[in-house]
Image: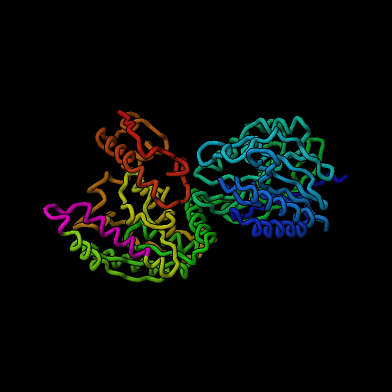
Amino acid sequence: MSDRLTLLSAQLNAVVGDVEANLEKAFAALDEGHASGADLVILPELFLCGYPPEDLVLKPSLSVACMRALEELAAKTREGGPGLIIGLPVWKEGEPLPYNSVALVADGMIQGIRHKYELPNYDVFDEVRTFKQGPKPLPIGFRGFTLGLPICEDIWLDTVPNELKEKGAEILLSPNGSPWRRNVREARLKAFSTWSDLRLPLVYVNQVGGQDELAFDGESFSVDSRGRIVQQLPDFEEAYGVTVWERTPMGLMCVEGKKSQLSSDLEETYLATMMGLGDYVRKTGFPGVIIGLSGGIDSAMVAAIAVDALGAENVWCVMMPSRYTSRESLIDAEACANALGVKYDNIFISPAVTAYDQMLSEAFEGTSPDTTEENIQSRVRGVTLMALSNKFGHMVTTTGNKSEMAVGYATLYGDMCGGYNPLKDIYKTEVFELARWRNANVPKLALGPAGEVIPENIISKPPSAELREDQKDEDSLPPYHILDDILYGLIEREESIDTIIERGHDLETVRRIDSLVRINEYKRRQAPPGVKIGEKSFDRGRRYPLVNRYKDT
């Protein structure tokens, strides 16, 4: 019996529902494990079907396909080399729901299957809806070692780790599907440290990649029995990492492991938007994206993210001037497109706007121009972009930030028209921060150029929708540093109006913003998806009723 255990953490990007492609990645991971001399390869949670499968996992045929794939993996291990730990749904006959499970295959056989005990049912998770709770998992033997196989949420609470320790586990090997959000790195380490007195090593293997509104950062790591980080995989990229463990009188000790450098806070945010958009486009099969480039900071930021994620050759920017578009915006939009190296076109919308004015003149007789006419311009732009999308196949990428989405400063079926919005969970003040950061840095794995990709004038000029003469955002909204602080309190912290006022904000301003947030829920419900960045993203992370008469007085 060996006293040495070599593990390969395989931090990979699965595609939800593509069992065959995920199986091929698992085969490649086994080959990598063989080449690196590993005894055991560990893949993320529900890897064979992809995570999160949501209601897709309620199709019994998906579990059948995953079990067939597992049997193929088991057969491959007959050839010698490493065993494999991999996640999949397991649906037992007669049960109302499948289990969220992990299997160990080795030496040509399925050695054992364990089921997830702690099913998360908060924030973006609703696993109680789609999975049956498993029993408290028992350890499993592997080539002379006793392994605990807790699945994701199982290690955020102490019940399962305690049970596995009590039953004789020497090390915890944990497949995860843990989505990224700000400060999640600290939250993970804090949560896992609460049961560090168990003196059990932990190998945490997280998936990486974008899935709908979620971005998974990877950041897989290992800690020894003293709670020290002995291995760290990079963030926001596929990676493999080897650790070597030796049995000692003090338990299993890590004698080999590499620690990668992790990204800074702003870079993490940028990488999450990049990955969210890039994987959404690639996994859904669009040939590229089309963006309405206005000469403003939001569309310039989205264009930069798209180029970094997809390459300039897959990004098409279109400026759609109206009679209110300034020469400054025309110059800025073209400069941004040139800096990014994208295809760029001008399509003037005045003929279509004039046609609508004529068409509606009789119906509007006796009324004065207002936001109705402004919104027609925005909707003409939406129709124009969708026409180009239908004709050439590119996905329309929208550009509204979280501040605008919160207060409804966006036009339904206009600038909200599209397939994905990378800025949906990023406040306006954060957009400015990201723009300056991107001009000074090239993110890792980015396909875009270095240097100033967002012209300084776009960042420094006052924001404007340019839908009427001399329009500025601050004509309708408080300055963004004030607005965002109020919104952060209302949305992220669920603070009362009194609490926000105590921070120095004007009562009537706070009440007006609170009212705008409430009455625009219907708009947000119809907005395209966008990657989750903070604690409370619209849709997945914050589910409010459309009809809602509650007011904080």
Picture layout, residue 255 above or below residue 155: below
Residue 384 within the magenta-colored segment of the rendering: yes
Residue in the picture at 78% in, 33% down: 168
**Residue 347 among magenta residues:** no
Please tell me whether residue 95 is drawn above or below residue 345 in the rendered image. above
- The furthest residue to the right: 1
For the record, the magenta segment spans 362-386
Q: Is residue 8 left or right of residue 392?
A: right
Give the quadrant of residue 345. bottom left
Q: Residue at x 23, y 68 (%)?
A: 351
In the displayed structure image, the side of residue 545 where residue 263 appears, left or right: right
Quarter of the picture holding the C terminus? top left
Q: Is residue 242 left or right of residue 299?
A: right
Residue placed most toward the observer, 192 or 102: 102
- Looking at the rendering, which quadrant does residue 303 occupy? bottom left
Image quarter of residue 236: bottom right
Residue sitting at x 66%, y 52%: 48
Residue 132 drawn at (x, y percent): 64, 37
Residue 175 position, x and y percent, is 66, 45
- Please tell me how many numbered marks the rendered image carries: 0
